[in-house]
């Protein structure tokens, strides 16, 4: 069947439109919408306007529900009934695949990029079929002698089994016996991990590590960046018999590696632990996997696939998304990136604001039509009618008032000396995999933390950091979750709930009932619902489908027991207060400064649409990072605090980015230093100083390409970032 045949067949299988009528999930206000099939569609709008509610909680949720209904009665008897999203009508819906950031992550220490993509499984076939064993003592190739492989130098070496299982670090046949295939072990009296002394982190037995293809062991190849790994396999030579046996495996390997490169992950190595991936990286790995399925007629729902990507990498990703579309699929992408919005076939904007003030359809049409639409806030920013935050003047670096990293050579950094001016807003830019996070997080943060007596892992390889005596504190605000379960919320993490519980305990009803502040905690017995242990939901195992969480029948999602809910403050129960959007809660608690102040800070960092009691495991990495930032902003910083942020604008609309930049610049105005790793051109344009790394990712990067003001970077022909700043 040709590609034309595939597209023709989808034309007959799929209707022309996806018809939505009366969508009311979460803050959606009866949205009516027609979407064209077989197109790249972007859902955009301010943060909290209802994009994910429409894309994931309405369209994808209903597709999943209908898929379960299509199963046999026997299969469905093991599953609870899934609730129907709140809407009037949905027609033209096809099978859907959700590729979001939260569901793409894995925490298993055994999972790697290679195992998640199944490239490593295919590589095991290659090494078992075509591998040449070598002596574990002298590394010379073992040669046959009377039908037995021996080392010509006479060394007593272990002979490897050449089976697929022999190269699995999850099975005893191949895994290192000392670390059991983990590649690391915990140090005594420490939570830190150290490389296994036996396998040096390679996870396999010595005999298996002595088997080579193309002169390399399987561990050496998985340690290469994906782009180099692809080149290695395309240049391999085999005997006719080997090539015949391995033909399909080699095609699968090269295809999957190419897809990983196309989605902007060419800098990752196959041995990279999956748990160290960002949400955006994990999501793009799933996207690359979908590219290899060759399926058509599906609805793909994606959540910010450009997160963490340089504009140059975004262009490659757009090509990948369009190829998925051209196979006859429909793509709905929740996105803020201007390049992807401009490249979309169709754009839907929700708004006009966040939370209760959003959920309305503002615009639907082409990107070009949106530019001139007077109601479209996104169109106003893309057309230049509105611009982002710009400081009144750029701060000029003061000679001698700086931190200088000497000889940075961790990962792909090439022994660079890098100077970060203090008292400035500094942006570290560069293509994906250029070494930005290694420089800022692995070296600068850890070295500063060590010098200031703050607990942190050992810094990466470098000669030293000059100027650390000029700072009093270092704060890293990253995108790791603020909690693994629904028990952590914005209210608990920031400490706001403590003040709210005290307020409820002071009411006359609470005093009559003898309730103390602890009664209003859903994390401990006493006032919580014991049927769900304060979770508000119960988990339903779906076996071969993703687990579903249903509302607790006893407390109906409130988390509290009936007696606790008898207490009200200004006619609201504790459960009703926790269900308020943060922006509304700030108004509700206006008379309580200890509560209203932190709530306003959360609004300033673009989180006014979140609910006070929203479960931490439903927050994106960007949202979790901004909750941490808000919690830090509530504290009184020291004399000079160094703030380090990694992609703080993830998940933010252009208008929210402008507000966040205003908050960060106020920190600098108070005498502190902010260093952010960012690809966002508006963030870079607002910086006082830019450090651009490159020129490429992986082994092609690790160098300082340019430093200076945004205008100087834009004028530098060697800077790939400058190209987009100038444009």
Image (spheres, rainbow, N blue to C red):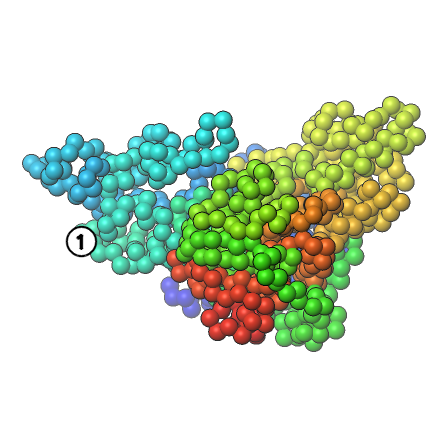
Q: Is residue 50 left or right of residue 16?
A: right
- The secondary element bearing badge 1 is classed as loop
Is 518 located above or below residue 384 in the figure? above
Q: Nearer the viewer, residue 674 or 212?
A: 674
Instruction: Specify the quadrant of the image occupied by residue 352.
Output: bottom right
Point out the image quarter for the N terminus: bottom left
- The single residue placed furthest to the left in the displayed view is 146
Q: Nearer the viewer, residue 468 or 560?
A: 468
Residue at x 71%, y 74% (from the top left corner): 385
Callout 1 environment at 10 Å: few (<14), some (14 to 19), or many (20+)? few
Q: Is residue 567 above or below residue 273?
A: above
Is 653 above or below relative to 72?
below
The residue where tag 1 is placed is 239
Q: Position of residue 711 (x, y in %)?
A: 59, 72
The residue that appears at 27% across and 36% down in the rendered structure is 206
Identify the residue shown where x is 39% and y is 54%.
226
Q: Residue 351's spot in the image, x, y percent?
A: 73, 61
**In the shown orientation, is residue 575 left or right of residue 676?**
right
x and y percentages locating residue 693 in the rendered image: 48, 61
Residue found at x 59% / y 39%: 454
Q: Is residue 43 visible?
A: no
| Viewer-closest of 458 and 74 | 458
């Amino acid at each position: 069947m040709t590609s034309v045949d595939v597209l023709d067949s989808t034309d007959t299988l799929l209707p022309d439109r996806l018809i939505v009528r009366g969508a009311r999930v979460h803050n959606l206000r009866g949205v009516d919408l027609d979407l064209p099939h077989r197109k790249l569609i972007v859902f955009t709008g301010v943060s909290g306007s209802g994009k994910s509610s429409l894309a994931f909680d309405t369209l994808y949720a209903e597709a999943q529900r209908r898929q379960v209904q299509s199963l046999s009665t026997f299969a469905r008897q093991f599953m609870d009934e899934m609730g129907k999203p709140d809407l009037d009508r949905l027609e033209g819906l096809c099978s859907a695949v959700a590729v979001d950031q939260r569901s793409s992550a894995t925490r298993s220490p055994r999972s790697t990029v290679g195992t998640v993509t199944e490239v490593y499984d295919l590589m095991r076939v290659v090494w078992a079929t075509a591998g040449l064993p070598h002596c574990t003592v002298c590394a010379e190739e073992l040669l046959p002698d009377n039908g037995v492989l021996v080392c010509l130098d006479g060394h007593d070496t272990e002979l490897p089994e050449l089976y697929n299982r022999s190269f699995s670090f999850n099975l005893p046949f191949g895994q290192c016996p000392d670390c059991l295939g983990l590649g690391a072990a915990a140090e005594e009296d420490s939570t830190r991990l150290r490389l296994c002394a036996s396998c040096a982190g390679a996870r396999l037995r010595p005999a298996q590590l002595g088997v080579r293809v193309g002169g390399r062991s399987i561990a050496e190849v998985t340690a290469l960046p994906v782009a180099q790994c692809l080149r290695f396999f395309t240049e391999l030579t085999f005997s006719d018999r080997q090539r015949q046996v391995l033909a399909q495996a080699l095609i699968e390997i090269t295809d999957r590696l190419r897809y990983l490169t196309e989605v902007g992950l060419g800098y990752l190595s196959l041995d990279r632990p999956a748990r160290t991936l960002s949400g955006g990286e994990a999501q793009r790995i799933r996207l690359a996997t979908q590219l290899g399925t060759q399926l058509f007629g599906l609805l793909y729902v994606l959540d910010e696939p450009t997160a963490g990507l340089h504009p140059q990498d975004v262009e490659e990703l757009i090509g990948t998304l369009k190829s998925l579309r051209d196979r006859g699929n429909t793509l709905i992408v929740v996105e803020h990136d201007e390049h992807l919005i401009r490249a979309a076939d169709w754009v839907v904007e929700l708004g006009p604001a966040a939370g209760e003030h959003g959920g309305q359809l503002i615009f639907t049409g082409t990107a070009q039509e949106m530019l001139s639409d007077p109601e479209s806030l996104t169109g106003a920013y893309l057309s230049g009618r509105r611009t982002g935050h710009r400081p009144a003047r750029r701060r000029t670096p003061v000679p001698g008032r700086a931190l200088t990293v000497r000889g940075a050579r961790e990962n792909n950094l090439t022994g660079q000396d890098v100077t970060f001016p203090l008292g400035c807003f500094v942006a570290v830019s560069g293509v994906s995999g250029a070494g930005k996070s290694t420089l800022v997080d692995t070296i600068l943060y850890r070295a500063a933390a060590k010098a200031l007596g703050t607990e942190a892992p050992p810094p990466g390889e470098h000669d030293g950091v000059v100027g650390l005596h000029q700072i009093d504190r270092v704060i890293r605000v990253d995108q790791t979750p603020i909690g693994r379960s629904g028990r952590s919320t914005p209210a608990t993490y920031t400490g706001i709930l403590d003040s709210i519980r005290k307020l409820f305990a002071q009411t006359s009803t609470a005093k009559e009932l003898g309730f103390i502040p602890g009664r209003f905690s859903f994390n401990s017995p006493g006032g919580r619902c014991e049927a769900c242990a304060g979770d508000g939901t119960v988990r339903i195992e779906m076996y071969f489908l993703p687990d579903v969480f249903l509302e607790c029948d006893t407390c109906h999602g409130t988390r509290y027991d009936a007696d606790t809910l008898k207490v009200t403050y200004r006619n609201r129960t504790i459960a009703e207060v926790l269900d308020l959007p943060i922006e509304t809660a700030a108004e509700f608690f206006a008379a309580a400064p200890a509560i209203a102040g932190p709530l306003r800070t959360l609004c300033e960092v673009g989180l006014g649409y979140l609910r006070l009691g929203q479960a931490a495991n439903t927050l994106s990495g960007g949202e979790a990072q901004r909750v941490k930032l808000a919690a830090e902003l509530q504290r009184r910083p020291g004399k000079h605090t160094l703030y380090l942020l990694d992609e703080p604008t993830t998940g933010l609309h252009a208008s929210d980015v402008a507000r966040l930049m205003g908050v960060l610049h106020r920190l600098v105005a108070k005498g502190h230093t902010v260093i952010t790793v960012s690809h966002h051109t508006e963030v870079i344009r607002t910086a006082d100083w830019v450090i651009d790394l490159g020129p490429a990712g992986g082994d092609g990067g690790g160098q300082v390409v340019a430093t200076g003001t945004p205008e100087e970077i834009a004028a530098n022909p060697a800077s790939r970032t400058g190209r987009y700043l100038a444009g």
